[in-house]
Image: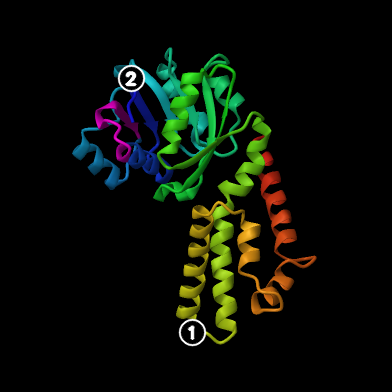
Amino acid sequence: MDIDGTLVLVGAGKMGAALLNGWIADGLAPEKIAIFDPAPLPAIAALAREKHIRLNPAIETITDAVATILAIKPQMMGEVLPAYLPLRQPGNVLISIAAGKPVTFFEAIFGADTPIIRAMPNPPAAIGRGMSVLFANPSVSAPQKQLSHTLLSAVGSVAWIEDEGLMDPVTAVSGSGPAYVFLLVEALAQAGHSAGLDAELAYQLAATTVSGAGEMIAQSAEPAATLRENVTSPGGTTAAALEILMGKDGLPALLTRAVAAATERSKELAR
C-alpha cells in the first residue's frame, strides 16, 4: 500500500487500531501516518514509538492530508470535530466509521463541498476478516473512492451502496451481525449442556462448529442454502432439528424481526 501524502487517523480505539494494524501489515510506510488520540492505548503508544508514527502532532503541521479516518464515538463527534477543521484541505477525503452519523452531519461541520465517505466496518476487522460498506457524497472523486476502498480492504471485504438510507439495514445485518453469531454459540452450547453434555465440552463443540461452518462458507463458491442441503440427510438428525429451526416461528422469522428492530434503532440514532 502506498499513498502520496499523510493518512490521518482520529481515534485509535479498537476499530482505529484494527485499521492501523491492517495498513502497516499491507506495507504502508508508518511515517505517512498521523494519529490523534488524547489518551492512546499503551499498545498504540508503543507502536507509534517503535514505527516512528506521528502521535498527536500539532495539527497545523499536517498540510498534505489525503485521507482522514474519523474513528471516534458518535456521541463525541459534535464536540471533537471542530478542532480538525484545519484538515479541510484540497485532496483530503474524510472517512467516518461512526455508526448513525449521516453524511449531512459532517457536511454541516466541514462544508457541503467536502469529500466525505460514510463507512460501516464490523468487529471481525480486528482479525482482518471484517465487512465494510461505504457510501460517498457527490464531492468524492473516483481516485478518492479507490483510496478509501484500499484503506478499508486492509481489514476485510468492502462493498459500496448508492443509497445512504441502506446504511441502517447494513448496520443491522453486518454491523450488529457478529453479536447474533456469538449468541448462536451461547445458545447452542447451552442446548448441548441441557442435553447432558459437560458445559465446557458443549461450548467447545458449539464454538468450533460455528467457526468451522463459517470458514466453509468463506471457502466455498456454493451459497449457504446449498451447503445446508448438502449436510442434511432426509429423515436424519439434522433434518429433525431444521424442522424446528425453519418453522413458522423459527430462526428465519426471528432474525427478520431482529434485523428490523436493529434497522429501526439505527434510524432513530441518526435523527
Query: How packed is label 2: few (under 14 Cα within 10 Å), some, or many (20 or more)?
Result: few
Q: Indicate the amino acid at tag 2.
A: Asp
Q: Nearer the viewer, residue 238 or 185?
A: 238
Residue at figure coordinates x 33%, y 19% from the top left: 4
Q: Position of residue 130 (x, y in %)?
A: 48, 46
Front: mark 1 or 2: 2
Left or right of residue 66: residue 58: left
Q: Which residue is mark 1?
A: 198
Q: Which residue is mark 2?
A: 4
Q: Is residue 8 above or below residue 121?
A: above
Q: Position of residue 172 (x, y in %)?
A: 63, 47
- Range of the magenta residues? 24-36
Name the N-terminal-most of marks 1 and 2.
Answer: 2
Q: Position of residue 132 (x, y in %)?
A: 52, 40
Looking at the image, can residue 268 be seen?
A: yes
Residue at figure coordinates x 43%, y 26% from the top left: 147
Q: Secondary structure at mark 2?
A: loop
| Residue 222 shown in magenta | no
Residue at figure coordinates x 42%, y 26% from the top left: 68
How many numbered marks does the figure carry? 2
| Residue 28 shown in magenta | yes
In the rendered image, the residue lying farthest to the bottom is: 196
Quadrant of the rendering where the N terminus is positioned: top left
Residue at figure coordinates x 33%, y 32% from the top left: 35
Q: Nearer the viewer, residue 57 or 256?
A: 256
Query: How packed is label 1: few (under 14 Cα within 10 Å), some, or many (20 or more)?
Result: some
* Contact between labelled residues 2 and 1, with CB atoms less than 8 Å apart: no
Q: Indicate the amino acid at tag 1.
A: Asp
Quadrant of the rendering where the C terminus is positioned: top right
Q: Quadrant of residue 190?
A: bottom right
Q: Is residue 120 above or below residue 220?
A: above
